Image (cartoon, coloured by chain):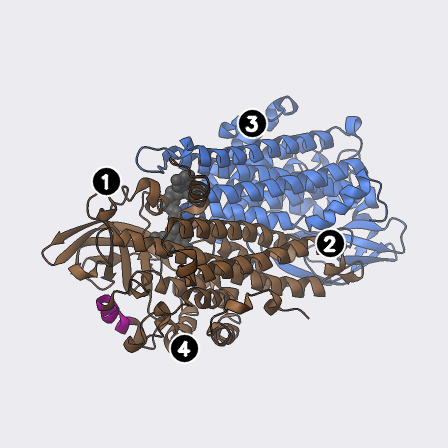
Amino acid sequence: MRTIDDFTRPLEYLSPLDDPLGMIVREWAETWVIPHRRRFDEDWKEHRLIEPAFKRLMGELGLQRVLFPEDLGGWGLGRSNYAGTSSYRLFEEVARADSGMAVAFGVVFWPLVMICMEPHVNRQLCEEFAPIFCSTTEPRFAANAMTEPQGGADIENMEIVKGSTIQTTAVLDGDEWVINGHKLWPTNSGGVCDLFGVVCTTNPGSEDPNDFAFIFVPADTPGVTQGPPYEKAGMAADKNGDIWFENVRVPKHYRAHGPGLDLLYFKEVITFGNLGSIAFVGGSMMNVYERLYQFVSEETYRGKPLKEHDAVAGALADIARDIEIIRIVGYQYARMVDRPDLYGPRWSEEMVAKGRAYKYWACDRAVEDVGRAMNIMSLYGADRDWDVEKHWRDLKIVQLWMGGKQLCQAEVARWFFDCRTL
Amino acid sequence: MGNSYSFPFLCEWATEMDLSLAENLREWAENEVMARRLELKEDYEGLLEPAIRKLFLEIGLQRLFWPEEYGGDGHNLPSAAVTATAALEQVARGDVGIAFLLSCLLALQSAVAMEGEVKEEICSALQEIITSKDDPALVSLVLPLYRDEPQATARAAKGGWTVEAASARPLACGASASFFGVLCALEGSEDGVGLLVLPGGTKGLKRGEAIKRTGLAVDRHAEVTLEKVKVSEGMCAARGPEACRAFLAWLYMGISASNVGALFASYEILREWGDNRVIKGRGNIFKENPLTASVMAEVAQDTALSRMLTWNLARMLSEPGVYGPAGAEDNYVTALMVAHHVSQAAERAINRSMEMMASAGYAKEWNLERYWRDVKTMQLCLGPYELAKMDVSRFFYHASGL
Ligand SMILES: Cc1cc2nc3c(=O)[nH]c(=O)nc-3n(C[C@H](O)[C@H](O)[C@H](O)COP(=O)(O)OP(=O)(O)OC[C@H]3O[C@@H](n4cnc5c(N)ncnc54)[C@H](O)[C@@H]3O)c2cc1C
């Protein structure tokens, strides 16, 4: 019998952590998530069921520490040459069980990419923030606060809008930044966040890259208020809400790197966002495959398993083809992330554009394929108990976030066709 | 029909009464559902149940197509297909689930209450349910999950049938239905299939546990088991392939119209977004951006064409003198194609509308996502598209082996 492990991985460039970590997370998923996930939707606000699974994965198994340097209690992934491929596998395995959990887990590292990744490790900030994540067995969450009420896509649309719409301001007052603004939707907001990375401007309306600032704000800093989580179509394990920053003061050195460099390395954050998104899609699709495999093998039509009907098999083949290709593309991008010596810096326009291309392709295929899988399952396709509909609801947002598909299209066209005004 | 007038339909086919009913239902949708859903979301007791009561009982849609001699309003002619389409569009704009339940009821009524073909025993048995002032008439239809394989079998017994079905999955309302319409394989009968009507309290009919689903929150979904259920011959609403196909053609029309209503609602939500949202820096109104405008065009196109197809189907069913009986194979295949096409168009268009609205499209607060879940859930009631295509090919290419 075929399993998800029969989908191809590029064996010659797997990280040494790929299989050991993959198996640990798979076991965690089977024990802590899969038996309970059908009740997650009702748990969106409280996280009573979801929280213990996070605690196990992030706190007790220690996976929230992986990016930090070893001497600070981390696993040193940020200094390795396999951060891309190993995180791809990690996110894929978590997403197989629940892509909302994968996002919440993945975003812990998202703002930390700014300070934990070679060649731009900010040692001082690593030292300061490592204890939050590395000296506890409780789950700790970070959030990457970009989106604002007037629009998230524009904030990510750096090449054209150049940060000019950012309304969250950072003003230097002596040795402190004073931050004012309103963010919404970040993963791990909605009350759970411990550490924010906040996209700010030091000069509202400016298109100067030097005015883009990425500043860390511990969630318990006076003046930070987190609103309750929003109710969504899916992804109950990810809490998203409003955050208000009112005269929030943080030390000057909480700015990740300073003028120009903040924006440069922020593009690497986008690269990791795209990589993570492909892994979330790929992982969910693996589980869709597993559930669909069972369904079409057990259900019969005209005395044969549904999968033996030629027309149904045609649709099943399309779905398997897409999962196979998503995985190959995802791992390839992960490899590109791991080898800047060959593929260029992770923050280059090229890497961002290619990541956007793979991400929106994977999302489009997944949204269509999971919809098709549900359709093959007739009335059962909408059942919570068959899990496929959950992946359908959850995955939709992967297509919509990070500026949505049209921003992806604009960036891809801009890079491949040298467009100047998109 | 308010804003939805922008999407063309052949208004010459609609009567004054159809149009004014649609206008009233538009108000029902706005007052009973849309005005209250921000606060009540998909709450059954607070929102959906009162809305369905108002629609089915007070406005009286459950009686509209019922024969006068059985206490109904007597609009039981084939032309009711157009009335139903005009009505369902507006109902679904408010709530797709309620429109779907109404579609099921109307399809069953088309089989039992059509003037000249009234099934007397069934109409007598259902009269109290349909004319009730207290409880909405909810029908649970048990149809094949996979194309031509009924979930239930009926064996000829003295003066009737003995029906069996193990953990059958109805389209809706397994837990709450006042009566059931069960499409059965008629064992030992040349007719092959038949639609049997069972009142909710029939002996041997067992309802299962509540099932959680993606959408159609108004539906109290559950499996049903039929153990040696006795049904008299007179409770057969449709006997043989043609009669069963006619019933299905009406159901498919109802599902198509309900999808159109969902498309109207999504269009309105997207239009408001397009008018007000700014992207690509200050002063650039969303709808004026060519990239998003091209997606919005496809959404409008899916909506407009779905409406045209649905009205054409309604017209065909309303004029058997011109197009032949509803259950003729060509009409059935048309209905099947329209329903699948429209429901895929609805899935696609709402998917794309969500793309346009990003997080807002995904948040319950904006209401778009509920239409997305609802139309997908309703689509699954048509069964797998891959199998439906076999009927289409069978008809158009004479592929009789399929
Ligand atoms: C579960 C979830 C998790 C999230 N996580 C995070 C997070 O961790 N951090 C964070 O900051 N935000 C997060 N978000 C927010 C998300 O990233 C934004 O919603 C997204 O970036 C789009 O922004 P918006 O919703 O403001 O829509 P808008 O910016 O208004 O964009 C809406 C649509 O406009 C179109 N569009 C935008 N720009 C262009 C253009 N230049 N050309 C053509 N069309 C365009 C696209 O179709 C886009 O989808 C999350 C949201 C959800 C639901």
Q: Colour of chain B?
A: blue
Give the extent of the magenta segment. A124-132
- Which residue is disc 2 drawn over? B146
Q: Quadrant of residue A198?
A: bottom left
Mark 3 element type: helix
**Residue on which disc 3 sits:** B20
Return the residue found at the far front.
A342
Amino acid identity at mark 1: Gly
Mark 1 / mark 4, whichever is N-terminal: 4
- Judge the density around disc 2: few (<14), some (14-19), many (≥20) Cα neighbours within 10 Å: many
| Pointer 4 residue Cβ closer than 8 Å to ligand 1 | no
Q: Chain of mark 1?
A: A
Which hue belongs to chain A? brown
Q: Quadrant of the N terminus of chain A?
A: bottom right
- Residue assigned mark 4: A61
Q: Position of residue B311 (x, y in %)?
A: 65, 31
Q: Say which amino acid is labelled 4.
A: Leu
| Residue A205: assigned label | 1
